[in-house]
Image (cartoon, helix red, strand yellow):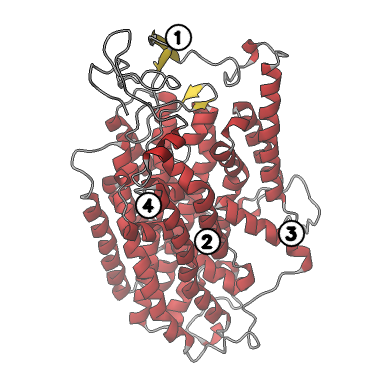
Amino acid sequence: MINIAGIISIVLFYVLILGVGLWAARKKQSGDDSEEEVMLAGRSIGLFVGIFTMTATWVGGGYINGTAEMIYTSGLIWCQAPFGYALSLVLGGIFFANKMRQQGYITMLDPLQDSFGERMGGLLFLPALCGEVFWAAGILAALGATLSVIIDMDHRTSVILSSCIAIIYTLFGGLYSVAYTDVIQLFCIFIGLWMCIPFAMYNEHVGSLSSDAVDWIGTVEPSQYFYYIDNGLLLIFGGIPWQVYFQRVLSSKTAARAQILSYVAAFGCIIMAIPPVLIGAIARSTSWNETGYKGVYPLSSEETSMILPMVLQYLTPSFVSFFGLGAVSAAVMSSADSSVLSASSMFARNVYRLIFRQRASEMEIIWVMRVSILVVGALATVMALTIPSIYGLWSMCSDLVYVILFPQLLMVVHFKHHCNTYGSLTAYIVAFFVRMTGGEPLLGLPAMIHYPGWDGENQLFPFRTMAMLMSLVTLILVSWGTKWIFETGRLAPGYDIFRCVVNIPEDVERVDEPAEGGEQMAVMTSAMRQYGAATMVGKDEMNGRINPALEPDDDMDMAEVEKTRGVRPRVVSGTTAGGGGSRGNPSTGIPVNENGSSPKQGQTSL
């Protein structure tokens, strides 16, 4: 029978999240529907909201339910996700946040498409999309399990309802709504779960939590060492190349602040894991056959995935469990929205605009993104209703992202001159093949290759990390090999079918000559890729194409700006021989306006 009081509790929390989301949507500048404003909140996220929204990158419904489930089934030592994702935030802050924010990118795929081209970027969008959809699906499944246990609400109804509400305010507010609901989310989780823990811990059916009385710590057998390391590396490095993370990084006011937010959020991930860890330990110490629980005992895998809501339902008073239920529901709704927004942003910008409609207007892109939000939300909802294991679904999110995206993002951010489209495509195929031949029990995909340590069900060999390393090595070697073959003339330029080594397309048009030095000036005549409010200043050659993206941060002095852009400080003096206009440093050519013309007499160009 449906619990009426529970329904009222859920409705109140839903109204709270929806209200905050719609209120935050009003912070968007009226009439400004640009990509930056909707996808990155105008790069204006402050420190307080930034800390909460960065922490909420990983802390959500799947995080707290999955953590409690693993403590109950395998013990603390196997609950790797909180520590793995915290380390991924630290490493992301050290190696990626500063560089990505300095370049003024809008999505994670921008540097990949700059280096490998639009179509290869579209191919790399697929694992990113799968990751976001799997993550959102795991979050929605967590809520469905919770509501079905505590208020006897139909699983399907609760998942669909939650998905619809999250989609509504994301449609209106973009990242503004996502960020501000994250603040409410973390408060609800922290207060709601901590309120439930004392009641559950001192329930008469709960035994001692000491490790002597019940083993909730767990052990790792010698035969599982490599499997354990493989999972840990997957979470650490596979947790970096996610749009939900870079969405927060790129929305920060400065690059330095993006790094700070990453470090603080890593600490927040550990703090927010404490309540579900305690709840999992309490569940492991509980004699469930003595409680009001009437199901199968020992608990089956279906019941263990709902262990957190079961503790709320059977070990705490009703009025307390409703606070815990509100915590979970609020967490889920405001976590699913960020994944849906991330996938939709990448599709609208990196697939629709850069591949199919280069001349699309800002308004057209925003409407494509809104339609994408509906489609991605529907995909996540369907998966939430069809795949049973929450923690397995949660862990699977990182697989394809880890083996395919991480090596490529690492190279384009730090070693972009040592990779090209040939290496990218080959590495993509190698990583996908090695990962798929390892099998996936959750999807019913049999293992085609039995690596050392195969136990009949699981690959104990670290084949995921092997796939990632093979992908990285393949990317480097194939890129170097194709560059050497073409540049030494062993293959004619006409065979450079991807046009990224020597057969580079004519993207530039000569428009004028300066009076001295004989250097020629060129401007892009094809659709120029813009990041933020940046205009073309200096050159950053990427496989023969010019990246005009270098927008400075507010906390950088001019010397650092010029260093970042790769040019010497320019001097404005006199006019050009071709009639008006200011002359820049000869190493960078003559600056031009956005319409391709030289500045008028007396104007300077920054």
Q: Say which amino acid is labelled 1.
A: Gly
- What is the CA distance from the residue labelled 1 to the residue labelled 3? 61 Å
Residue farthest toward the right in the current orientation of the protein: 452
Q: Nearer the viewer, mark 4 or mark 1?
A: 1
Earlier residue among tags 3 and 4: 3
Marks 1 and 2, the one that precedes in the sequence? 2
**Which secondary structure, mark 4?**
helix
Q: Quadrant of residue 72?
A: bottom right
- At 37% from the left and 61% from the top, the residue drawn is 52
Q: Kindly identify which numbered label has been placed on residue 474.
A: none
Q: Badge 2 local density, few (<14 within 10 Å), some, or many (20+)?
A: many
Q: Earlier in the sequence, mark 1 or mark 3?
A: 3
User: Is 447 displayed left or right of 302 in the figure?
Assistant: right
Spatial separation of the CA atoms under disc 4 and disc 2: 21 Å
Q: Earlier in the sequence, mark 4 or mark 2?
A: 2
Q: Quadrant of the N terminus?
A: bottom left
> Horizontally, is 536 left or right of 203 in the view?
left
Check the image and report above or below for 527 versus 47.
Answer: above
Whether 327 is drawn above or below 92: the answer is below
C-alpha distance separating marks 2 and 3: 21 Å
**Residue at image mark 4:** 337
What is the total number of numbered labels drawn onto the structure image? 4
Residue to which mark 1 is pinned = 518
Q: Quadrant of residue 296?
A: bottom right
> Which residue is found at the position 58% from the left and 44% from the top?
406
